[in-house]
Image (cartoon, grey):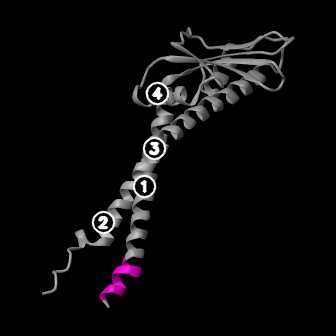
């Protein structure tokens, strides 16, 4: 007596479909942490570039002090609450808003290892802290230029959470599409010929 045909859920194609989705999602989970750390690094670098441009704009008239309204607008556009740029042989350029700045931590940009970046990125993703962080970095041009800026950690958390949501949706879509392709390929190349 011939064995009864397997149900669609227990067929080879269906099992490979589920296995493929599981493997793709597992790989995406492993890749997520380095990608999250990279996204945080990009966020900090973008803030550094915006802070440098704000300082350059404020230093357009070195003989005149920066008006408080101009400084507040430059800080708003750069997404920071305080900026200081020190070039060799020149007086420092500082932009400060009306509110006092009290950063809760200092980040040395370019001196964090991968594990440290990943740990900080996970903390920023999980904890929506209503505080500020100071970033210290160097700029290649002019050589020896140092920049420091303060940003709101809430904005970092928002950026990382948006990235995480997009990453989850893309990962699910990739896993489902890959599983569907494997399912169709197995059904066309193996299952269908065996039923003829």
Between disc 4 and disc 2, the foreground one is: 2
| Residue 30 drawn above or below residue 106 | below
The answer to whether residue 140 is magenta is no
Image location (x, y in percent) of residue 175:
41, 58
Please say if the residues under marks 4 and 2 sit with CB atoms less than 8 Å apart: no
Image location (x, y in percent) of residue 146:
74, 17
Crowd around label 4: few <14 · some 14–19 · many ≥20 (10 Å): many
Q: Main secondary structure of the magenta part?
A: helix
Which numbered marker is on residue 30? 3
Residue named by callout 4: 124
Q: Secondary structure at mark 4?
A: helix
Residue named by callout 1: 24
Q: Secondary structure at mark 3?
A: helix
Image location (x, y in percent) of residue 109:
64, 23
Magenta range: 187-195
Mark 1 to mark 2 CA distance (whole Å): 14 Å
N-terminal of the two: label 4 or label 3? 3
Give 131 or 25, whichever is nearer the viewer: 25
Give 78 or 44, whichever is nearer the viewer: 44
N-terminal of the two: label 1 or label 2? 2
Residue named by callout 2: 15
Looking at the rendering, which quadrant does residue 67 occupy? Answer: top right
Crowd around label 1: few <14 · some 14–19 · many ≥20 (10 Å): some
| Residue 173 drawn above or below residue 116 | below
Please say if the residues under marks 4 and 3 sit with CB atoms less than 8 Å apart: no
Mark 2 to mark 3 CA distance (whole Å): 23 Å
Left or right of residue 123: residue 142: right
N-terminal of the two: label 2 or label 3? 2
| Residue 186 drawn above or below residue 76 | below
N-terminal of the two: label 1 or label 3? 1
């Amino acid at each position: 007596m011939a064995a009864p045909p397997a149900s669609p859920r227990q067929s080879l194609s269906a099992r490979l479909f589920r296995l493929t989705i599981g493997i793709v999602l597992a790989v995406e989970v492993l890749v997520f942490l380095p990608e999250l750390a990279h996204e945080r690094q990009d966020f900090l670098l973008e803030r550094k570039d915006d802070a440098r441009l704000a300082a350059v704009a404020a230093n357009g008239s070195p003989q005149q002090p920066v008006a408080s309204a101009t400084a507040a607008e430059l800080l708003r556009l750069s997404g920071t609450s305080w900026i200081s740029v020190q070039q060799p042989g020149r007086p420092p350029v500082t932009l400060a808003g009306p509110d006092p700045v009290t950063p809760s931590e200092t980040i040395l940009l370019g001196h964090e290892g991968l594990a440290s970046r990943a740990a900080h990125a996970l903390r920023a993703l999980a904890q929506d802290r209503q505080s500020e962080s100071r970033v210290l970095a160097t700029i290649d041009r002019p050589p020896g230029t140092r920049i420091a800026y303060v940003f709101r950690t809430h904005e970092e958390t928002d950026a990382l959470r948006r990235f995480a949501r997009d990453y989850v949706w893309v990962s699910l879509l990739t896993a489902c599409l890959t599983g569907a392709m494997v399912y169709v390929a197995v059904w066309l190349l193996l299952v269908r010929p065996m039923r003829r």
